[in-house]
Amino acid sequence: MTLLNVLQFPDSKLRKKADPVSVVDDSVRKIVDDMFETMYHQGGVGLAAIQVNIQKRIIVMDVSENHSAPLCVINPEIISREGIQHEAEGCLSFPGVYETVERAAKIRLKALDRQGETFEMDAEGILAICIQHEMDHLQGILFVDHLSRLKQERAQKKLQKLKRRELT
Ligand code: GNR
Ligand code: NI
């Protein structure tokens, strides 16, 4: 397995759009395994391939506390959404910044699993938030894009400040 480099804002590669996976083969499963390793290593609950400079519609997630619920979704589509929730979000590509974002409360998802089989699932709470956050990445959208201009500026300043502190 290989740890992948996670791109950080304002890297323009985070604005690329991911292409659907045409065949789920061993090369795709290798990407999935490396993404899980990278996500767990970074302490994240989700990771989109775009964040590791791979322009494919691949997402890994695990919202459990003990790495017991790995979930891989390929070519995801949200087929229904219901309600609204507001929760603080963070992002491995925007370290140190946490802001509240509005998301659908419940979603139904259709995707391929790591065997290339189609499945559907319902999600709510943090898992529903995570899926929506990761699916945004696949379209080049970051969670800060959902914030007001004022909060976007505040987030950028905070990130710059944290980066300056890393250098000293
Ligand atoms: O690790 C992560 N935590 C998180 C917390 C609240 C809402 C969304 C997330 S996803 C984030 C990992 C990440 O950046 N995925 O793209
Ligand atoms: Ni993110």
Image (spheres, rainbow, N blue to C red):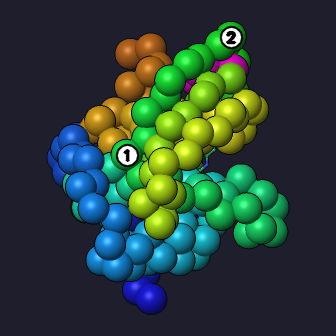
The answer to whether one can see residue 108 in this image is yes
Q: Quadrant of residue 146?
A: top left
The numbered mark, 1 or 2, whose residue comes first in the sequence reads: 1
Quarter holding the C terminus is: bottom left
Q: Which residue is mark 2?
A: 83
Q: Residue furthest bottom?
A: 1
Q: Which residue is mark 1?
A: 75
Instruction: Say if 18 sits above or below 155 in the image.
Output: below
Identity of the residue drawn at 37% across and 46% down: 75
Look at discs 1 and 2 and give the one toward the viewer: 1
Q: Is 125 in the magenta?
A: no
Q: Residue furthest front?
A: 117
Instruction: Say if 163 sits above or below 33 in the image.
Output: above
Identity of the residue drawn at 42% across and 60% down: 116
Report the front residue among 61 and 118: 118
Instruction: Say if 29 sits above or below 8 in the image.
Output: below
Q: Quick one: SS at disc 1? A: strand
Identity of the residue drawn at 29% across and 36% down: 139
Q: What's under tag 2, amino acid-wise?
A: Gly
Instruction: Please state the extent of the stretch shown in magenta in the rendering.
Output: 101-105
